[in-house]
Structure formats: C-alpha cells, structure tokens
Image (cartoon, rainbow, N blue to C red):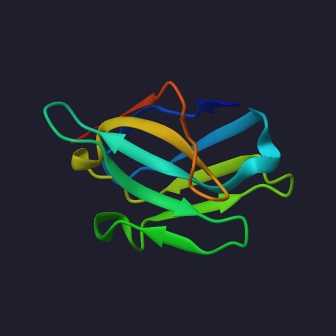
C-alpha cells in the first residue's frame, strides 16, 4: 500500500503562482508514475500532469507552458509548480501514484486551489 499526502494549496489571485507537494509513504519502491489530477465543481476529474520515475513528463494542453511537474531525489516526492494561474484552474488537486506495472493506483485526499479574478 502507498499513502499520499498533498500540501500547498490555497487562494491566489489570477496571474499568481502556487507550488503543490505530495509525499508518498509505504511501498514506495513499487511506484513508477506520480502526478496530479484536478476536479472542478460539476466536472470530471482530469489529468493535469504526470511524471515517470525516469523523468518523462506529460501535461494537459490547458496547462502546458504554465505548470511544471518534477520528482524529488528520493523519488517519493512529486511537485507541481503552477504559474500564471487562471480562475479556470480552480479545483481540488489530487496527487496520484501508479505502480510499475499499472496494477495499482493510489490517491491523496486532495488540496483546494482557488484562483480569484
């Protein structure tokens, strides 16, 4: 089992920046991909960005050029640097981890990001 804990959400004005962090504990040796999803009120959860243990990244088109995902040296940390935030980025952001063979998937409890116009 893997436990994920997010931090760093909050309220920011449009154009501002926030940095989300997620730390994994438990069976971290099994993790390959870590990343971030978000869910806005009335909408489906969507992928924001993810990064593999080898450093390959994948971003949603809506955040390319504004958000950057990175892994910590210990490989059980993942960050999401969010710049040039827009009101439409307002959502609950969830940390996600997937095992090496895709057989297991884990979620954090979520952290609220609110961008005011």
Give me the residue at 50% from left, 24% from top.
109
Give me the residue at 42% from left, 50% from top.
16
Give me the residue at 58% from left, 61% from top.
69
Quarter of the image where one finds residue 55: bottom right
Q: Is residue 41 above or below residue 36?
A: above
Q: Residue 63 placed where, x, y %?
A: 36, 64
Q: Residue 98 placed where, x, y %?
A: 59, 50
Q: Residue 46 placed where, x, y %?
A: 31, 50
Q: Is residue 101 above or below residue 106?
A: below
Q: In the rendered view, does 30 fall on the left or right side of 67? A: right
Q: Residue 64 placed where, x, y %?
A: 39, 72
Q: In the rendered view, does 117 fall on the left or right side of 46? A: left
Furthest residue to the left? Answer: 42
- 84 or 90: which is nearer to us? 90
Give me the residue at 63% from left, 41% from top.
21
Q: Is residue 60 above or below residue 77?
A: below
Q: How many numbered discs? A: 0
- Split into 4 quadrants, where in the image is the N terminus? top right
- Split into 4 quadrants, where in the image is the C terminus? top left
- 107 or 38: which is nearer to us? 107
Quarter of the image where one finds residue 53: bottom right
Furthest residue to the top? Answer: 109
């Amino acid at each position: 089992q893997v436990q994920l804990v997010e931090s760093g959400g909050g309220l920011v004005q449009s154009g501002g920046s926030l940095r989300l962090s997620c730390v994994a504990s438990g069976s971290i040796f099994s993790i390959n991909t870590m990343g971030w999803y978000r869910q806005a009120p009335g909408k489906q959860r969507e992928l924001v960005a993810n990064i593999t243990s080898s450093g390959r990244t994948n971003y949603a088109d809506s955040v390319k050029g504004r958000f950057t995902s990175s892994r910590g040296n210990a490989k059980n940390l993942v960050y999401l640097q969010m710049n040039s935030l827009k009101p439409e980025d307002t959502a609950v952001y969830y940390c996600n981890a997937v095992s090496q063979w895709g057989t297991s998937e884990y979620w954090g409890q979520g952290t609220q990001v609110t961008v005011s116009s």
